[in-house]
Structures are given as structure tokens and as C-alpha cells.
Amino acid sequence: MRVFAVQLTQLSLLLLALFGLASWVGFEDWLGDPLYRLQGLGPWAVIASLLLLWVDVLLPIPSSLCMIANGAIFGSGQGALISLVGGVGATLIAHLLGKRYQRHMIKDLSEQDYARSQFYLTKWGAFAIVLSRPVPILAESIAILSGALPYSLTQISLYATLGHLVPCVLYAQVGASLGTM
């Protein structure tokens, strides 16, 4: 289990470094106000919002601001649904990245350490996925590490939905209230 804690730390630091680099080159400045940028896209705003939420796995996209913008543009119901699809999709993308990275995660483990790690990850993995969804960097790191879990895409989707549901609804409601001002 210690190996996965080290890998979680390493992944978090790598994502933080990617975010720092993207901010340094001005990527975040370009995004600035997602509401302003998404409103100008008309019917393409849904696709743009989904893409922004999906690339949040590796780039510093302010997903909470995108979700608030979804509520402001599409209303609380549709905004929450778009944000939920975007958030769950991002979790699945990260999970699939982790599946590709899995052989690197387990290559140095003995059979006993691997069995013990699988036991703990299976026992606590779903809980970690659900609770980490609204936490920047940690959410992406845990979703990537979930690639080592013996869960199906359906299970990962369920856990991601449970973890994203409340934040997506709340952000969309905030956005909808801003959109009516």
C-alpha cells in the first residue's frame, strides 16, 4: 500500500507541475472567465464545456467555474447534467490513463505486496473515488491510480457519478442564480 501512497504523491506533484507550467505560459489567462467564453459559442458551448472538463485531467481548467458557467448558460438542470457528464467523463479518461500506467505501478511489487495492495485498494478505492471528486489535483491523481483497481468502467462510472452529483448540482444552481441577475 505504501507504494501506491508514494505513487499518489508523485502523480499529484506531476499534475501540480503541469498546472504550474500551463499557468506560467499563460494558459489560465486565456481561459480567464469560462462564462464569457462559453456564452459566445452558442450551441457549441455544450461541446466546449465537455472538452474543458475532460482535459481538466491534465491541464489547469477551473472545472468549478466551468460548472458554474454551465448553470448560468443552460439553467440548473441542464447545467448540472452537462457538468455531470463532463466530470464523469474526466474520471473515466483518467482511469483509462491509469490502466495504461498500471504496469509501471506494479512492476516493483512482490506478489505479497501486490495482493495486499489490491486488498486495500479494493476495500477503500470506491470510497476514495467518490470523496475526492471535488478536490483539485487529488481527484485526478486518484482517478489515474484507479486504473490499478479491479473495477469495471461501469463501477468507476457509478463511483464518479456519486462523487460528482452534489457538486455539479450545487455549482449549476449557483450559476443559474448568477445568470438571472
Image: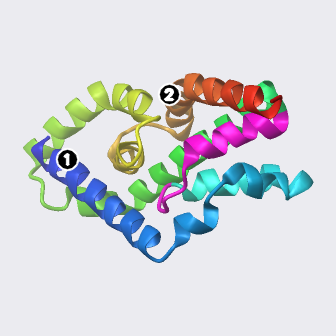
* Residue 84 in the figure: left or right of residue 78: left
Q: Is residue 59 magenta?
A: yes
* Residue 42 in the figure: left or right of residue 31: right
Residue 2 in picture, x, y percent from top left: 10, 44
Identify which residue, 172 or 138, lies in the foreground: 172
Q: Mark 2, mark 1: which one is toward the viewer?
A: 2
* Residue 118 in the figure: left or right of residue 51: left
Quadrant of the image occupied by residue 142: top left
Question: Which residue carries the number 2 mark?
Answer: 163
Mark 2 residue type: Gly
Q: Residues within 10 Å of mark 1 (few under 14, many from 20)?
A: some
Q: Is residue 125 above or below residue 148?
A: above
Which is nearer the N-term, disc 2 or disc 1? 1
Identify which residue, 97 or 39, lies in the foreground: 39
Mark 1 residue type: Phe
Q: Is residue 139 above or below residue 169?
A: below
Q: Secondary structure at mark 2?
A: helix
Residue 21 in picture, x, y percent from top left: 39, 72
Q: Residues within 10 Å of mark 2 (few under 14, many from 20)?
A: many
Q: Is residue 81 visible?
A: no
Residue 172 in picture, x, y percent from top left: 69, 30
Residue range corresponding to the magenta coloring? 57-74
Query: In the image, what residue occupies the spot 68% across and 53% down?
Result: 34
**Residue 158 badge:** none
Question: Which residue carries the number 1 mark?
Answer: 4
